[in-house]
Image: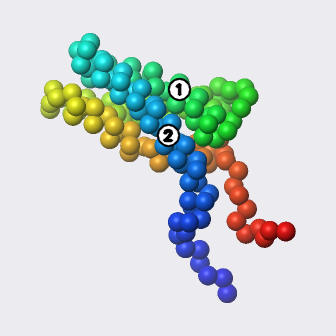
Amino acid sequence: MDEPRRFDVVRLWQQYGARLLRYGGVTIVSTIIGLTVLSFGIFVLEWPALTANVLSVFISTPPSYLLNRRWVWGKNGDHSVAGEVRPFWIMALLGLVVSTVIVSTVDRYTDVGIIILFAQMASFGLLWLLKFAFLEKVLWKAEEPAHDAQPV
């Protein structure tokens, strides 16, 4: 009789760990870019948080796309606008909508820039794993290793 499959952290780590770490590295790079633009807009240019947030997403998305595509999922060659670029930008715009709602809401209650920065980071953090799953299973469909195969 077969045992029901249990949640196997070791198997999950073996299957996704390296890619998840690289994805985390790309996230750090794009977060630094986005927070730098957001901070510059808020603190130096004294823009409204909404304007600075929109610009930060539009500037940080292209490097995120390129690094994720090449370094995390190992995709080379031509870029499919319909199959890759558009879905990636849709995800970025979804993140923008979520972060904009959160940043705008926080901005109504405080003018403390550091709180606005943390609000943006938290909003993108909410979508991080969902985005990884989408990239892994839908956009760049990583090859599944054979778990039950016996070595020859």
Disc 1 crowd rating (10 Å Cα; few below 14, some 14-19, many 20+) is: some
Above or below — where is 80 with respect to 21? above
Of the pair 6 and 71, the residue shown nearer to us: 71
Above or below — where is 45 with respect to 139? above
Give the residue at x 71% y 58%.
Answer: 145
| Farthest residue, direction right | 152
Q: Would you say 57 lies left or right of 138 here?
A: left
Quadrant holding the N terminus:
bottom right
Q: Position of residue 111 (x, y in %)?
A: 16, 26
Above or below — where is 40 with respect to 101? above
Q: Position of residue 54 (x, y in %)?
A: 37, 22
Three-letter code, disc 2? Gly
Which mark identifies residue 86?
A: none
Secondary element at tag 1: helix
Give the residue at x 85% y 68%.
Answer: 152
Give the residue at x 59% y 65%.
Answer: 11
Which mark identifies residue 25?
A: 2
Of the pair 79 and 35, the residue shown nearer to us: 35
Give the residue at x 52% y 66%.
Answer: 9
| Farthest residue, direction top | 45
CB under 8 Å between callouts 2 and 1?
Answer: no
Three-letter code, disc 1? Pro
Q: Earlier in the sequence, mark 2 or mark 1?
A: 2
Disc 2 crowd rating (10 Å Cα; few below 14, some 14-19, many 20+) is: some
Q: CA distance from mark 2 to mark 1?
A: 12 Å
Q: Position of residue 149 (x, y in %)?
A: 77, 68
Residue 147, located in which quarter of the rendered image?
bottom right
Q: Would you say 73 lies left or right of 123 here?
A: right
Of the pair 36 and 128, the residue shown nearer to us: 36
Which mark identifies residue 63?
A: 1
